[in-house]
Amino acid sequence: MLTIYGIKNCDTVKKARKWLEAEGVEHTFHDFRTDGLDDALIARFTDALGWEALLNTRGTTWRKLPEDDRTDVDATKAAKLMVAHEALIKRPVWQKGGEFRLGFAPKDQDEIKAWAKG
């Protein structure tokens, strides 16, 4: 079963979920804000995807962080920031079994569909 992780109000997550339904791909949705986010889940994501790929440094949440939080970021600091501020996680995160993917670019939709249904 495919699981998609994110925030329900995120436009990209909304598009991905709508697309999955239109394509008939069975899935579950895990909303970080209502279903939770902890160190163990972040560790699974970062082990599979890398913290650099997962940490969203382009968004408003990042820019609003104190300068001290945005400097000298390493894996440990990034994980703590993402647990404290779920909007710092690039979305959506996809999981199928032990495999993970990140994002929902239109150019990747065929690949995501094959992966999700495969």
Image: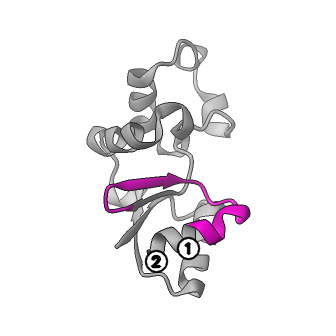
Residue furthest to the left: 40
Task: Write down the region rendered in magenta.
Answer: 96-111
Pointer 2 and pointer 1: residues touching (CB < 8 Å)? yes
State whether residue 16 is above or below residue 6: below
Residue 117 badge: 2
| Residue 46 location (% of width, % of height) | 41, 38
Between 80 and 99, which is closer to the camera in this rendering? 99
Asked whether residue 5 is drawn in magenta, I would say: no
| Residue 99 location (% of width, % of height) | 38, 55
Q: Residues within 10 Å of mark 2 (few under 14, many from 20)?
A: few
- Left or right: 48 as drawn, with respect to 105: left
- Which residue corresponds to mark 1? 113
Residue at image point 37% right, 60% down: 34
Helix, strand or loop under label 1: helix
Residue at image point 56% right, 53% down: 91
| Residue 94 location (% of width, % of height) | 46, 59
Disc 2 residue type?
Lys
- Left or right: 61 as drawn, with respect to 44: right
Between 47 and 90, which is closer to the camera in this rendering? 47
Between 21 and 98, which is closer to the camera in this rendering? 98
Residue at image point 53% right, 73% down: 114
